[in-house]
Image (cartoon, helix red, strand yellow):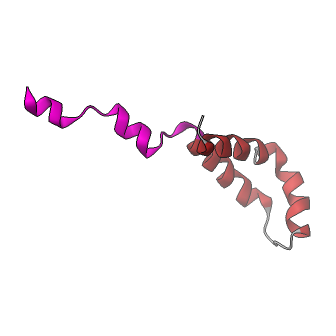
Amino acid sequence: MRGRNWVGVAFIFLFLPVNVPLWDIVLPKLGINIMAVFIVPLFFFLGILLVFYPSREDRISTIPSNQANEEE
């Protein structure tokens, strides 16, 4: 797993929807006046995208090259 995938896994666990009450306590202590109900699902889905969506290098390596088809 790449670093990007590990960040995605961390986002998934930190921003599970069950953790909304925890973030409701932490955010005001950090001086951020926003409800966690709006923030947590966004970061949770961002974590899912980081884990399951392939990186640019992975997508390029799995797409067959057009040059090989043109040579035949």
Q: Inspect the magenta stretch and tell me whether residue 66 lies in it.
A: yes
Q: Residue furthest top?
A: 72
* Picture quarter with the N terminus: top right
Residue 38: x and y in percent read 71, 60
Decide: is 39 above or below 66: below
Percent position of residue 62, x then y: 36, 32
- Residue 15 in the image, given as x and y percentages of width and height: 75, 48
Tell me: 57 left or right of 67. right
> As rendered, which of 44 and 7 lies closer to the eye?
7
Q: Does residue 43 sit above or below 61 in this rendering?
A: below
Q: Residue at x 8, y 25 (%)?
A: 72
- Left or right of residue 22, residue 46 in this image: left
Q: Which stretch appears magenta?
A: 51-72
Residue 48 is one of the magenta-drawn residues: no
**From what the image shows, is residue 64 above or below residue 26?**
above
Residue at coordinates 16% horizontally, 30% vertically from top-left? 68
Please tell me which residue is depicted at 79% across the width and 59% down the height of the picture: 36
Task: Identify the residue shown where x is 78% and y is 69%.
Answer: 34
